[in-house]
Image (cartoon, rainbow, N blue to C red):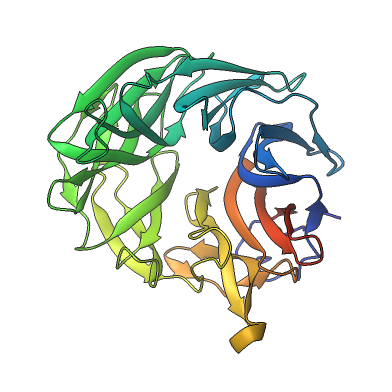
Amino acid sequence: MLVTLGMTAASAGVAPNAAKNVAGIQADSVACTSTKCVITAMNTAGTKAKTAFLNLANGSVKVTSWSSAAISSYQVACPDKTTCLALGYGDNTEVITAISTKTGAEKVTAKLPTADQYNLFNIACPSSKYCWVDGSSAAPGVQLPTWALLLKVSPTGRILKRTVNKSYYMYGPVSCESRATCLIGRETNRIGFQSMTMTNGKFGKPHVYPANYLPFDASCHSDKMCYSIGASDRAAADLEVTSLNPKTGAPGKAVRLPFTSSTSVGIAESIACYSSTQCVAVGAVNKGTGANQTTEAAYVVITKGKVGKPVLLSTETASEFSSVSCASPKECYAVGTYYIPSTETTASIVAKV
C-alpha cells in the first residue's frame, strides 16, 4: 500500500505504512495532476530517461515503454492535465522533453545549442499557457564564469523567449503563486543568493538571503505562503527551510531540518506547500553508526513555521526522497531511490506523504 497521511495538523502524526518499492527505474522527480502523477527517472543502467505513472485511484505505478533521446530527466512540471515537461540531458546538450500523460509518449521538443555551456535547474508552470525554466549559461566553450539563464517555454516545450543576464551567475529556484506572479532566486557575482517576485516576466525588488545560504527548491501555496529549502553553509551540513514573503519574495525565518546529506546522490530534498499553513518537505535521515550507517527516506510536515518530527518511510539501504508534489491539498506524493547491495543497483520508492 501507499503511505497514507491526512494532511491536517490534527492527523499529521498518523503512523504511515511502508513505502512502495518500484524496480527497474531510478526515480528523480514527480509532478502531479488531479488524476495521476508523472515520475521522471532513469533506467537501471542509467543510460536512458524513463517515465512512470502513479495512478491516484489505486496506487499502482506503471513504467511506460517509451524512452526519449534524453539520458536523464531531473525536473518535471505539468502545465495541464495532458502534457508534462521534463528537463534533462541528452546528445551532449540540455533538453526539454514533452511527456503525454495519456500514452507516456516522450518527445524532445527543445535543445540548447551545444556550442554554449548550459545548465537547466528548475521548471515551474504558472498556467496552462507557459512555463518558466531557469539555470545558467556561459560563453561558447567556457564553463566558468556562468551567466543567469531564464527561458519562457510553451506548454508543448517550445522555447518562446530566452534571456541571459550577465550580471548574475544563475537563476533558480522558481515557484509560482498565481498565473502572473512567481518567486525566483538568483546568484550574485559575490556568491550570494537573492529572492524576488517575477510578475509577467518582470522582476521586483531583490532581497538577500543570509550569507552562504544555497536554495535548491521552493514552493508556494497561492499567494498565502511560500518556502524555500536549502543549505545554510553551501555544503549541505545544515539543511533548512526559509519562509518567503509571497508579496515581495523577501526571505524570513529559517528553521533547521532533521535531514542529512544523502549517502548515494548528494543532496536529496524537496518541498511542497499544500495549504496556507502547511508544507511537506522530503529528504533522508541518518540511521546507524560507523560501517552500518545508512540513510532512510523521510518527510516532515511544517505547520506555521514549526517543523514536525521526521516520519521514516523506508528501511531499505541508502533510501532517500528526492522530490514531492501535491495532487490536491489532501494528497501529496514523494519519490526517491534506494540501493540494492546484492545486485549493486538502484531502485525506486514511491509514497503518499
Residue beneath the point at 87% across and 41% down? 58
- The reply, left or right, for residue 196 in relation to residue 70 is left
- State the residue in front, 218 or 224: 218
- The reply, left or right, for residue 353 in relation to residue 96 is right
- The reply, left or right, for residue 315 in relation to residue 260 is right
Badge count = 0
Image spot of residue 230 (x, y percent): 38, 59
- Image quarter of residue 31: top right
Residue beneath the point at 46% across and 12% down? 158
Image spot of residue 118 (x, y percent): 35, 30
Image spot of residue 209 (x, y percent): 22, 56
Mark yes or no: residue 291 visible.
yes
User: Which corner quadrant holds the N terminus?
Assistant: bottom right
- The reply, left or right, for residue 266 in relation to residue 11 is left
283 in relation to 191, above or below: below
Residue beneath the point at 32% across and 14% down? 161
Residue placed furthest toward the front? 141
